[in-house]
Amino acid sequence: MADPMKIRAQMKGDICDIKILMSHPMETGQRKDSDGKVVPAHFIQSLSVDLNGKTVISGQTGTSISRNPVFGFKVKGAKAGDKVTVNWLDNKGDKRTDEATVG
Amino acid sequence: MPNRFVFLLAALLVIAGVARADDYRLRALRMIQNDFQAKGQAGLDRLETDSLQHVCNKYSDKPPAPLLRLVEADQLATVKYPADGRLMGDWREGEKIAQSGRGFTWTDKPGLPVGGNCYNCHEISPRELSFGTLGPSLRNFGRNRGNTPEMRQYVFSKIFNAKSFNACSAMPRFGYIGALNEEQIRHLVALLLDPESPVNQ
Amino acid sequence: MRQSIAIVGALAIVIGSLCGQAAAKDAATAEFDKFREVMEDSNPAELFEAKGEDLWQAKRGPKQVALAESCDLGLGIGVVKGAYVQMPRYFADAGKVMDAERRIVWCMVEKQGFSAEELFRTPFANENFTPEPTSLVTYVAGASRNMKIAVPISEPHVQDTYQLGREVFSFRAGPYDFACATCHGEDGKRIRMQQLPNLAKKDEAIRAYQGWPGYRMTGGFMLTQQWRMNDCFRQQRFPEPRYLSDTVTSLLTYLTANANGNVYKGPGIKR
């Protein structure tokens, strides 16, 4: 299982500011290693953010995003104490789910 | 306390202070000799300081005047001038040489010459904004100093062995170590002195 | 070339164009500084802090012991908070002044039984590999976030090491006659467009300390101060300093103590 994400969810007024740090090599499949061999594509394909069990953000991501990506979202209708769950799935079928509490 | 005693005490403290400084230096040198390993083209021989480095290290880059003159004359004597006496080349080539230059590090492929990378430290052509400030600006060098045989000789010598005119200069001795060959130095002389060079526009 | 994009709200990265004065290039530096400020709020270095924390807590090595229950970073066994900014310091059990990375590796070898040879073989991170000490250093450094740098300079061993470091800093050698001081011994200088802090000065030394360990955006890996010293010597055209050697420790002691009193903001981010 991949390394855990770091999720920060902070209320700023009535908007919840969510920042997610993901640990992932995000290989495009176009890079060659020092031996000249192509490094196979390995990247997050889709991700979703749930608030108290309800999906508020979902989307697909592609190969142009860098290694260890940082994502930021602003969500309405959240309050301190709510549970934020982030899921991602990559092109190799590897996945990760992590939680945080809105502060 | 009697004055004589205070004076003696002060003198002893000064000597002790100086002795302590030398002690640290010696210990540091021994520590350095112990703590490095050869890698790529960077051999341990690089830690053997030559006479120039020894003097500049010993006097923290400010040797006393008589020694300074001796060292500078010594360094000037290392300059090898072109056999045909021609000291100026093509400023266009000079600009390329000033821009490029890598080498001598342990990740570089060995082989000389390696170029000057003059822009690391100097402002040269007004068209190049990405320049360093470790050395003085060379803008209008030829315009200010004149494109004379004496100036050409000075510039050639300076690039070949910068320490000829400033014993503990920060500038490497490019010709002396072979980073730049005779042809390349000629082009750099032109870059600085040729009236057509952008440096002098 | 892949784009390297962090999607944070409406962040736009503007790189100033190369027209007009040299100040335009400084605009590029200013833009990167703004980017760095935002990124430091969610710095991928935190992923390595988390990894380092796991390594610190887990029972590992042939002796199956956790660093958390065996390693003294100067403030007591297992105490991590505030330890980074009080190193280098003298450790009586080792009989040596040690910087953070050197102490962590010492603990890994002495307390957990890891092979020193193994750890010395690949000490620095690259795109494909992060050594465990690097993650541990990042964790320990993160635990000193927003604390004042306080190298115990008046302790005799540290004072001694500081003086040796000062000598190393000004030692000229190699084909280019370079010392550290050649580039880092004067005010207001730069090499090409890279500003060079005067590291001999008390109020500028912080500029070298801040930002390490640092997450390198190009390639996506963590680098520590031990790496930085190594790469400086490479650029000085010297041979390679031994990892965790006295020479490197003495330099780090000199540079860090010169920054005493300044607040350390935690692991940083590099281009």
Image: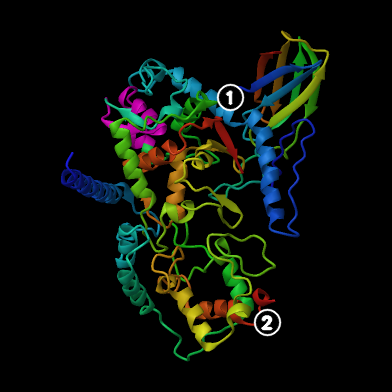
Residue segment shown in magenta: C93-119
How many marks the image carries: the answer is: 2
Q: Quadrant of residue C257?
A: top left
Residue A103 belongs to the span the image colors magenta: no
- Whole-percent x, y for residue C79 in the image: 42, 18
Residue C209: % across, % down: 50, 38
Q: Nearer the viewer, residue C205 or C104?
A: C205
Disc 2 designates what residue?
B196
Circle 2 crowding by C-alpha within 10 Å: few under 14, some 14–19, many from 20: some
Find the residue positioned furthest to the bottom: B84
Q: CA distance from mark 2 to mark 1?
A: 61 Å
Q: Secondary structure at mark 2?
A: loop
Task: From the image, tell me which residue sits under label 1.
Answer: A3
Q: Is residue B74 above or below residue B104?
A: below
Q: Amino acid at mark 1?
A: Asp
Q: Is residue A36 left or right of residue B170?
A: right
Q: Quadrant of the N terminus of chain B?
A: top left
Q: Is residue C238 left or right of residue C157?
A: right
Position of B175 with respect to C11 (left or right) is left
Q: Position of residue B183 (x, y in %)?
A: 51, 80
Q: Chain of mark 2?
A: B
